[in-house]
Structure formats: structure tokens, C-alpha cells
Amino acid sequence: MDFGFARDDEDFRAEVRAWLAAHATGVGGRRAWERTLGAAGWIGLGWGVSGYGNRCATLTRQVVWAEEYARSGAPPRSGHIGENLLAPTLIAHGTEEQKARFLPPVAAGDELWCQGYSEPGAGSDLAGVRTVAVREEVGRGYRVTGQKIWTSLAHEADWCFVLARTEPGSKRHHGLTFLLVPMDQPGRVEVRPIRQLTGTSDFNEVFFDGAHAEHVVGGEGNGWRVAMSLLGFERGVSTLAQQIGFARELEDVVRAAEESGAARDPVVRERLVRQWAELRTMRWNALRTLGGSGDAGAPSVAKLLWAGWHQRLGELAVLVRGTAASVGPADWSASSPYELDAAQHLFLFSRADTVYGGSDQIQRTIIAERVLGLPREPKGAV
């Protein structure tokens, strides 16, 4: 596609930079920051003219906002799951009542969401979910029972969209339903943080024990279609913003290589140049598919590109520092068993890049079956 920024886009860029410079410091917590963004109309730029509290922006201006946000060093978003995943799904598949109920609080930064997809034994293989939803005897809702895992921001979320099995005896992608579940249900919803290699807990286990769910998106039994539609929203503008962060990390690695003397090694120099060239390639590929290329394999190709690239960058980050990379920035203590600097955190966290969001193996299977038309992979019984 012919992608470029017009004069009006650059004027918009100046507005964005000025606003972020004035508001992105001294924020009183992540939820307060979401409300600040919402009050200024910065949430939901890509929803189109939905009329639910967001301001509409062209595709180029959405890119401008995402890039400038990444450059500004503004706080990490807590509301991106509701804004970029749930909202487009409701706009495509929800009822008018559901849009009126859920979109305004997302646009205002008042309600935060998490995604209940992956389960133990059904991570990248999403069709293997075992969480069950049974119709309530009284009322129009469901009772949800099961376990979800690797659930980002579940400890902060007000709501969770959950893929559950509503047809007894159904298998694979049949009999699934997309449900909206309130998280504030003591005794029925339990969140347990998962401690990672980095020492942090960005993900959670979520246990549903008869949790009430009243809202169905897309109709009972149509969960697979809705879920696949949602996964398509995980690419696009956000990919370009992600690459701004990648570029900053690459600059840090190059600087560390120069300071340690590793940059004098021709093999290290070749790897650094390759990382730079591959990052540029990823940008042009993201721009090529931004407007919707119709290529069924585009999301899988993008995931394979950035996941492997970022993992290799993490390996380089510790390689160029030599033996110093094995020493933490602070002494060990019982209350803080170990601390990591930025390079060590990058190395450890990036080990998961080729697993979460759909493992590399799953992405290659999707490309083989849906793009190349190769025989489908045999599936075991569920």
C-alpha cells in the first residue's frame, strides 16, 4: 500500500507529542492514567465513528499516536485489552445493548478487561478449551466453571471475556461460546499470580467456580468464529508501536556493545547489523499489511518475524556484555532474591516470545494449512 504521512498528520503528531509531554509524568497509578487518557479522548481512536465516547482518527493518525506513545516513555497501558481486543469484537459481533453498556466505560478508562482464552493443556491449541458454561435454571445467564492461565492483567481487570464450552459432549471448535464475565465475584472467581523467570508476575491463573455470566457475544455456539475474529485485531497499528520499543532496545544493545568492546568483533557486528535490517523489514511488512491485505497467513508471519527477532536480541543483549551479564545490579537479600538490569530482563522475558500469543509451531501449522493448502495436522481426541 502507498503509506505516508500528510501535513495534517504531522500537525497531529505535534499535538500528540505536546500532550504526552505535559501529562505522561507524575501519573498516580495505571488506572488513573487510563482515566486521564479517556478524559482527553485518546482511547478508541481505531473504533471508527462508533459514537460511544471515543474520537475517530484516520489510520495514519492511529499510527502516529501509537508511535509517539511508544517514544514518549509513557506508562504501560492497562486498558489496551479492552480498547484493542474487546471493543472491535463488540463493534463487529455485539448487540447494540452490549455496545452501549461496555464501550463507554472502556473509552473513559473506567473498566479494565482481561482475556480468558488459554488453559492448562490448551494454550496455543485454543480449540481444546475445557472450561464449561451451563445455563442457569433461573434467569438468562450461565454458570462458568474451569481454569484459565497466562491471563494478563487479571489481577487488575473488572471483566474477562471467556471462551467456554456450552454444548455438552462437543469437541474442538464446536459448541464454544464467547462470554463476558465480571471478575468481582468472591468465592466464584479466584486470581493467582504466576511468578516468572524475571521475578515479576505479569500473568495469572484464573479459577471460575460457578461464576455468573450474563452477556453472550455473537450467539451461543458461535464462540470460535468470534474468537478468531478477535485474534485478527491483535495485529496492525499496535505492531508498529511495538517496533518503536524494539528499536530503543536495539539502540541500548549497540551502545553496550560499543562500551564493552564487543562491537570490534566482526561476528558481533554482523549480528547487530542483521538485527537492524530485520527490524526495518518488519516495519515495511507491517505497513504493507496495515490496511488489510486479505492474506490469511499475514498475522502468523508477523508473529514469527517479531518473536524470533526479539528473542535473538535478548541473546545479543547478554552476549555483548560478556561475563558482566551474569552479575545482578544489586546484592542478594532474602526479601529480594535477585534483581535484574534491563538487558537481563530482556534476555529472560524474551524466552517466552516464541510461545505466548500462539507458539511458533502453531503459527507454522496455520501457514501450512491455510495458506499453502498442505494436509491438516492430525488432532488428538479432546
Image (tube, rainbow, N blue to C red):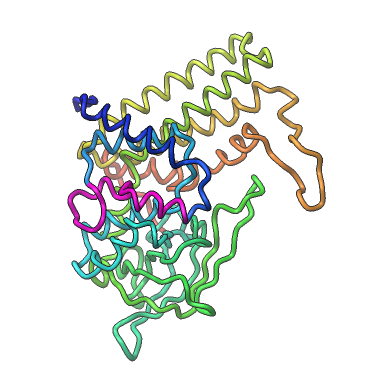
Taking 91 as reference, is 101 above or below it? below
Residue 261 horizontal side relative to residue 135, left or right: right
Give the residues drawn in magenta, as a range. 32-55
Depth check: give the residue in front, 349 or 169.
Answer: 349
**Front-lying residue, 184 or 315:** 184
In the figure, is residue 139 to the left or right of 263? left
Who is closer to the viewer here, 351 or 327? 327
Residue that extends furthest to the bottom in the rendered view of this protein: 138
**Residue at the spot 35% in from the left edge and 27% down from the top edge:** 283
Residue 342 makes an appearance in the image: yes
Q: Return the x and y of residue 57 as percentages of the image width and height.
A: 23, 41
- On the image, the x and y values in percent for residue 246 come to 47, 30
Q: Position of residue 167 (x, y in %)?
A: 32, 76
Q: Is residue 111 magenta?
A: no
Residue 382 appears in view: no
Would you identify the image quadrant in which residue 116 lies? bottom left
Q: Residue, x 52% and y 52% (percent of image)?
A: 28
Image quadrant in which the C terminus is located? bottom left
Residue 31 in the image, given as x and y percentages of width and height = 47, 56
Residue at 44 percent of width and 66 percent of height? 158
Along the viewing direction, whichever of 8 and 319 lies nearer the viewer: 8
Query: Looking at the image, is 294 positioned above or below residue 162?
Result: above
| Residue at the spot 19% in from the left edge and 28% down from the top edge | 1
Main SS of the magenta part reads loop
Residue 52 part of the magenta segment: yes
